[in-house]
Image: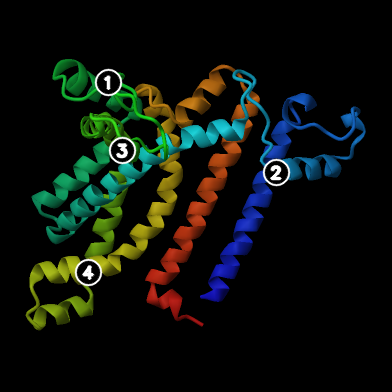
Amino acid sequence: MFKVILRQFLILLLSLFTLTIFTFSLTQFLPNHLVFAYPTSNAESLHILQKYIFYLTNILQGNWGSSLISGESVLKEFFILFPATLELSIMALVTALIVGISLGVIAAENKNKWQDKLVISTTLIGYSMPIFWWGMLLVLLFSLTLGITPVASRIGFEYDIIPVTGFMLIDTLLSDQPYSTDAFFDALRHLILPTIVLATIPIAIFARVTRSAMIDALSSDYIRTSRAKGLPYHRIVWGHALRNAMIPIVTVIGLQTSVLITGTLITETIFSWPGIGKWLLEAVYRRDLVTIHGGLLAIATIVILTNIMIEIATHLLNPKLRFRR
């Protein structure tokens, strides 16, 4: 296991090094005073390697430049807005795992039956559906027509919640206001539609992967042995088969990280969600290249770290990889 962690750590360093080279090349299109202060006024006289060393030093020190629009530190703005995106992404991922795995198991149990065909057709529609169209359709139906869910933002304007963690659901529970419980359920209602929109594509992918993995697992010898022993069917499916089918599902979770972050660009814009997706899209509209550079660097770093952790978790879950010489 130590060799696995060491190998993943080396991959992490190589990936981050490649990422900094790419983002450093972007800064060469910006005036020198906008991003980093070089130690000499004549920055053009510096060698490209010297510029990269100064760039890397500033990145490690947390100096990622200041926004051209607000004048605030890009790294500071990112950490202020990131909890909103993380809260939405976690809710979408949990929803996608619960719904997607359940649909995949149902489809595998009823292979080639109408339940299986219904799941396959539904997931195909969900995967091919444009997010912006799906989001606006849900807003039109549930917000404007039925009035069940709010249209935008994270919480109603009538609630004054002081941010502590940045996660609205947690902050409402930590608040000492008399309406903290009402604020919690209001924040939860604001999360419903963005979560559904963001989780639609991952649900389709998790359902397909689970179905394929469960079909292989249910046809294995150990499943037939379990049936011969007279174990309850639900225990065989949900206890034995699903546990072995989780290995490819965990791998797909890492791949879906970038999908969720990409989806937040559109989802947060539709629902006016104050997260990094909406922040970056506004930076693109306003040509705030410093913010785009910082956001790209931060998001890519998060995706790389997530995939490295998923790779380690895969080795822990898979006995063949864990005990392989």
Return the disc, 4 or 2, that comes first in the chain's sequence: 2
Residue 38 at x, y percent in the picture:
83, 34
Q: Residue 247, located in which quarter of the rendered image?
A: bottom left
Q: CA distance from mark 4 to mark 2?
A: 48 Å
| SS at badge 4 | helix
Mark 4 or 2, closer to the camera: 2
Residue type at the position of mark 2? Gln
- Give the residue at mark 3: 169
> Do labels 3 and 2 touch, CB within 8 Å?
no
Residue wearing tag 2: 61
Q: Secondary structure at mark 1?
A: loop
Mark 4 or mark 1, which has the lower sequence index?
Answer: 1
Task: Tell me how far mark 3 sits from mark 2, CA to CA.
Answer: 32 Å
Q: Which mark is residue 151?
A: 1
**Left or right: 156 in relation to 46:** left
Name the residue type under label 4: Ala
Label placed on residue 204: none
